[in-house]
């Protein structure tokens, strides 16, 4: 067989072999792409699971924070009410102080009037008690003498 004819006769099997190699290479690339995409699918699925769990955790955290906000809002309302009460009492202090000042002046006036009405009393308490005791002693002796005199009748 002639070399050109031999080469011609081998052309179809070579083209088929090249086509198979090309197909094989294409299939290997497709398998690699498939495997890479499978890996991406798994990674993405993991992210979805993670985000889903994260969403659940965040929703619980949100509920906890909302409950805390509600509690703090009530506490703030209570503190605001207490501040308003103190402000109210503070606003009443000037008139209360003025009323007490008027009362104090009246009490001081009454005290001064009572002080002016005091007159010095001559003598001492001890001397007055001695005098009363002497009079009681005399009275008791007189009663005793009378009882003795009546008793002997």
Image (cartoon, rainbow, N blue to C red):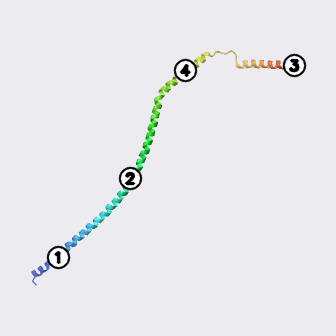
Disc on res. 59? 2
Residue at figure coordinates x 36%, y 58% from the top left: 50
Q: Mark 4 vs mark 3: which is more N-terminal?
A: 4
For mark 4, give the secondary structure: helix
The part of the image, by quadrant, that contains residue 153 is top right
Residue 77 falls left or right of residue 119: left
Q: Mark 2 vs mark 1: which is more N-terminal?
A: 1
Q: CA distance from mark 2 to mark 3?
A: 114 Å
Disc on res. 16? 1
The part of the image, by quadrant, that contains residue 131 is top right
Residue at figure coordinates x 81%, y 20% from the top left: 140
For mark 1, give the secondary structure: helix
Disc on res. 150? 3
For mark 3, give the secondary structure: helix
The x, y position of residue 24, in whole percent, is: 22, 73
Q: Between residues 35 and 131, which one lies in front from this camera angle?
A: 35
Q: Between residues 103 and 2, which one lies in front from this camera angle?
A: 103
Q: Mark 2 vs mark 3: which is more N-terminal?
A: 2
In the depicted structure, whether residue 1 falls above or below residue 88? below
Neighbours of disc 3 within 10 Å: few (<14), some (14-19), many (20+): few
Q: Mark 4 vs mark 1: which is more N-terminal?
A: 1
Q: Pointer 4: what residue? A: 106
């Amino acid at each position: 067989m002639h070399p050109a004819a031999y080469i011609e006769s081998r052309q179809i099997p070579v083209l088929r072999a090249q086509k198979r190699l090309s197909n094989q290479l294409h299939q290997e690339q497709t398998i690699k792409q498939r495997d890479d995409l499978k890996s991406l699918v798994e990674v993405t699925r993991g992210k979805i699971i993670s985000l889903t769990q994260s969403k659940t955790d965040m929703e619980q955290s949100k509920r906890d924070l909302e409950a805390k906000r509600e509690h703090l809002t009530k506490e703030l309302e209570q503190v605001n009410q207490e501040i308003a009460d103190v402000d109210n009492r503070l606003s009443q202090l000037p008139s209360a102080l003025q009323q007490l000042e008027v009362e104090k002046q009246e009490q001081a006036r009454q005290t001064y009037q009572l002080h002016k009405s005091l007159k010095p009393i001559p003598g001492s308490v001890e001397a007055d008690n001695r005098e009363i005791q002497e009079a009681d002693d005399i009275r008791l002796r007189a009663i005793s003498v009378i009882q003795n005199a009546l008793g002997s009748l």
